Image: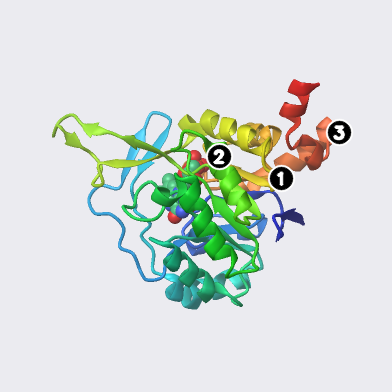
Amino acid sequence: MVDIGGAKLKNRFMNASGCFGYGVEFDRLMDLKKLGAIVVKGVSTVPWRGNSGVRIAETPAGMLNCIGLENPGVDYFLTNYLPFLKEKEIPIVVNVVGRSSEEYVEVVKKLAGSGVTALEVNISCPNVKAGGMSIGTSPETANQVVKAVRSETDLPLWVKLSPNVTDIVEIALAVEDAGADALTLINSLTGMTIDVRSKKPLLGNITGGLSGPAIRPIAVRMVYQVAGRVKIPVIGVGGITCLEDALEFFMAGASAVQVGSGLFRDHTLLERLPSEFEAYLEEEGLTAEELVGIARRNVNA
Ligand SMILES: Cc1cc2nc3c(=O)[nH]c(=O)nc-3n(C[C@H](O)[C@H](O)[C@H](O)COP(=O)(O)O)c2cc1C
């Protein structure tokens, strides 16, 4: 077991929210028990339809999406998905979304006593008009929303940060100050693509979130910067496609990692990564704790 901000995980490898549905979808593709924890797609107070039009576009080293947090709502999640996840006996992290502090708090209240392991408050989705990234790009609103959620729950509280900011450390410190137990970074970067035949933006939402290998160096940089300043654990996410990619995040200071778009190309990746990681540590004669943040210590040595 690994402790990440008070949440006991089976290992340091999880899926990233939104790239794994609610687990049911991946059940026939992989052994879910191999996951350190399952992170479900964002859930809101009531069902959200998401954006209309084209919602996914391929890019040279990743993808753009503008799903817009389509989800069936927290009540549906509790009734229809949570029993299945509990049967699997894997730690369950619920990604929480809202358009205002009140909406985040309402979802969190409904999750009280449900048996979920941790909350991941998403203040970073670039594809919704209210809430999401509009909250997570200002230290003041980020602090305010996280404080509101913190006062409602004793569950381990992770907060997912947006890379679409000038100073990620400023936001991370504001969220830590509000009582977060861990930080997940990064969500996708705002991008855009144009269909040159129709001469119009390809995505229905005009812009979308860029994910995949293209964003990995940015994510690694942000994890390095944030982990050097906060006292709470950092969970690294962005463009992981193999063990080496994950190692970069650990060396930058992440205590655990998540894999998102990488699963669309290789759905068995999360089955292999935990054992590959253990084999690597053994070969190097290192503990996981020694590996986390080693790149910074080597710079300062
Ligand atoms: C199709 C899709 C849907 C996503 N939905 C969510 C979501 O509901 N909540 C969230 O916090 N992040 C969501 N994300 C962001 C991912 O969790 C992750 O932060 C991002 O894709 C970067 O990681 P990756 O490069 O490994 O995909 C989504 C990403 C994709 C590609």
* Residue 93 against residue 238 in the figure, above or below: below
Gap in angstroms between the C-alphas marked 3 and 1 = 26 Å
Q: Which of 177 and 276 is in front in this view?
A: 177
Disc 3 residue type (three-letter): Gly
- Which residue is denoted by mark 3 in the rendering? 285
The residue beneath circle 2 is 170
Sequence-first tag of 2 and 3: 2
Amino acid type, label 1? Lys
CB of mark 1 near ligand 1 (< 8 Å): no
Residue at position x 58%, y 30% in the image: 221
- Residue in the image at 13% along x and 34% along y: 198
- Looking at the image, the residue that sits furthest to the right is 285
Q: Position of residue 55 (x, y in %)?
A: 30, 48
Crowding near the residue tagged with mark 2, few <14, some 14–19, many ≥20 C-alpha atoms within 10 Å: some
* Residue 158 badge: none
Residue at 14% x, 32% y is 199
Q: Name the residue under label 1.
A: 231
Residue occupying the far left of the picture: 198
Q: Looking at the image, which residue is at 40% across and 62% down? A: 100
Question: Is there any visible trace of residue 224 in the rendered image?
Answer: yes
- Indicate which disc, 3 or 1, sits on the residue closer to the N terminus: 1
Q: Can residue 258 be seen in this view?
A: no
